[in-house]
Image (cartoon, grey):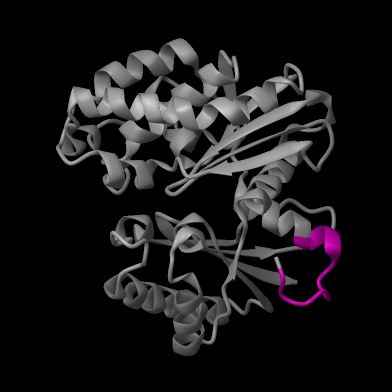
Amino acid sequence: MRLGVLDVGSNTVHLVAVDAHAGGRPTPMSDWKQPLRLVEMLDKHGNIEDKGVAKLIDTVHEAKDLAEKLKCEQLLAFATSAVRSATNAADVLKRVEKGTGVELRILSGEEEARLTFLAARRWHGWSAGRITNLDIGGGSLEISSGMEETPDLAVSLELGAGRLTHQWFDTDPPERKKINMLRDYIDAELAGPAEQFRALGEPGLAVGTSKTFRSLARLTGAAPSSAGPFVRRTLTAPGLRQLIAFISRMTAADRAELEGINADRSHQIVAGALVAEAAMRALNLDKLDICPWALREGVILRRMDQGHDQGDDV
């Protein structure tokens, strides 16, 4: 079964095609993505602007055409934080379906956290014991923790790197005052959820998923992506604090020159780093292991578990 997974994220529209079978690894045979930055196209009323919807329709149409050329038998299409939080989400979904024939399903924040947790559990295995997983996207932060494949607690907060950059920073590099104000805001948003997670007990393994965490780990000395997925990569709290002091003084263009970060995300890495540092501090985590699997792998694994005759729901 060739399965296509179309992920309309807050930063990027991402299509992967996988030859999926029970017990197999969700390794893409094709991987295509297009930067879109939907979370930065929300107007003051919370609507995705018309130009953003038009770009989304064009991009989804391109992804659908590619999936057909790749002979995908099913296409699982879903949207996350930027569309989920948009005031005009229902209208956006209707316009995308009318313009492309693709029916996008909005994942709730809890679903997103649970599916990402499943991917982290399958990657690290049962010997990890309790896993606490953090995932920073463009629009939201997901935190989950549990002993099984389904987490005991899963939450989503609108603390994505792109969202916070768009809302808080209006200079490049960001003003020190704005950075301090954003730190206080993130701490306040994390206070309640962090207390709930700490009550579950200390994890056997703390994990970071998402491109943001991979970039932060690389910027603090972890192995490059060319070393392959099986090299252990970690992000430490002291290393992260030192990194923030360094990159927060740089322009986005200068940050883009650093190894481990690309131009599409260099403008939002400071906000992402602030979220990562605050979350680790709130949860008393000194180190994260970086997991190469995340939401898309979780979606594929869930479908493989269910079998391929269950319709097109994620």
The residue segment tinted magenta is: 303-313
Identify the residue shown where x is 20% and y is 37%.
252
- Predominant SS of the magenta segment: loop
Q: Magenta segment: does it hold 308?
A: yes
- Residue 241 seen: yes
Q: Nearer the viewer, residue 231 or 145?
A: 145
Residue 19, image x, y percentages = 70, 65
Q: Horizontal placement of 256 versus 294: left or right?
A: left
* Residue sticking out furthest to the top: 238
298 in relation to 50, above or below? above
Q: Nearer the viewer, residue 288 or 275?
A: 275
Q: Residue 162 placed where, x, y %?
A: 36, 46
Task: Judge whether residue 27 can be spotted in this image.
Answer: no
Q: Residue 107's quadrant in the figure?
A: bottom right
- Give the residue at x 48% y 34%: 214
Quadrant placement of the N terminus: bottom right
Q: Position of residue 148 (x, y in %)?
A: 84, 36
| Residue at (37% x, 61% y) in the render | 46
Q: Is residue 295 magenta?
A: no
In the rendered view, would you say 285 is above or below 77?
above
Q: Split into 4 quadrants, where in the image is the C terminus?
A: bottom right
Residue nearer the viewer, 172 or 216:
172
